[in-house]
Image: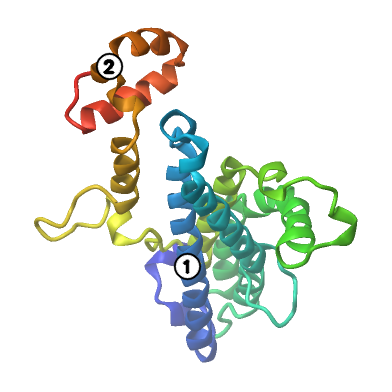
Amino acid sequence: MRLTDLPKDEILDPSWVADYQTKYDALWQQVTFLVNRMYINGKVSEFPIDLFCPPHRSTFLREVFFTFYQAALMCIWRIAVDTGRDFLTIRGLKNQIAANIRKDGPHDHSELKEAFLDLVRASDFEQVVGAAEESVRDLRHSYLAHLRTARVDGTDPRTSAPLPVARLEKLTEAITRQMTVLGFGLERPYLLPEYNDRIRQPVGRRGEPDIDRLLTHVVADSEIIYWPEKSPQGWKFRRPGLSEEELSWFNHYREKLGLPRA
């Protein structure tokens, strides 16, 4: 049985459909918040800040990264890890759906429930979130929502956090997959239109996302990007010290700025 082919009131108790939709939409808004912060943070984290920005000119980008990292982590906490009874979470809505599968409708109750549980089993939400749950809880309780005295040891939680961006990205992917389960296979967009290549834009509106334009401006304002022309001798000694990845980024932005590859 494909739940995507059925209207909600044939899957769920009709008296609970409105409540379900309200809760699903609220979680969808939270996941949208999370996905867009992770998108921007992904752009910032992959940008070679040390290549183009001296330390005194990289503060803004580093602070954006740390602020969005904390915002994303707190969102993951409240929708995927928190266990408070009075709070709306992904796990809580999953359990409510299972308890409100329609018993007196045109479809067999056990088949409906099994179809939903098949979607749940196909998702790796519990495995991915479960593996990171302790770290999320520790960061939330020790640094973000509280400052636990026992953890004030002189380390910077922003740089020593046990959950790097790649790990948060996996958590975010697991959360979006679980939202598809809660929507009975329905996939809704989370990225804002400017960031989502799958959403068609009016003629003349589609261009580089603002974060990409911002990072290009950062490079255009750097000195090193113009070294091949302005300081050929300096560039002659600087170029061999760049890694292949750094040189790839260097030429990527050179081409974007209308400059020849170096």
Q: Residue at x 49, y 85 (%)?
A: 17
Dot 1 falls on a residue whose secondary structure is: loop
Question: Which one is in front in this view, the residue at disc 2 or the one at disc 1?
Answer: 2
State how far apart marks 2 and 1 are (Cα).
54 Å
Measuring from the top left, give residue 119's x and y in whole percent.
55, 58
Outermost residue, left side: 203
Measuring from the top left, give residue 88's x and y in whole percent.
63, 77
Point out the tag, 2 or 1, that comes first from the N-terminus.
Answer: 1
Q: Residue at x 10, y 55 (%)?
A: 204
Placement of the C terminus among the 4 image quadrants: top left
Q: Is residue 260 above or below residue 195?
A: above
Residue 228's disc is 2
Measuring from the top left, give residue 82's x and y in whole percent.
71, 68
Residue 134's disc is none
Q: Is residue 15 left or right of residue 167?
A: left
Q: Is residue 119 visible?
A: no
Identify residue type, mark 1.
Gly
Q: Is residue 82 visible?
A: yes
Q: Is residue 215 above or below residue 31?
A: above
Q: Which residue is mark 1?
A: 183
The foreground one among 55 and 15 is 55
Dot 2 falls on a residue whose secondary structure is: helix
Q: Is residue 234 above or below residue 187?
A: above
The foreground one among 205 and 59 is 59
Q: Residue at x 71, y 83 (%)?
A: 86
Q: Toward which corner of the image does residue 240 lie, by quadrant? A: top left
Q: Is residue 250 above or below residue 213?
A: above
Q: Is residue 104 left or right of residue 133?
A: left
Q: Residue at x 88, y 60 (%)?
A: 149
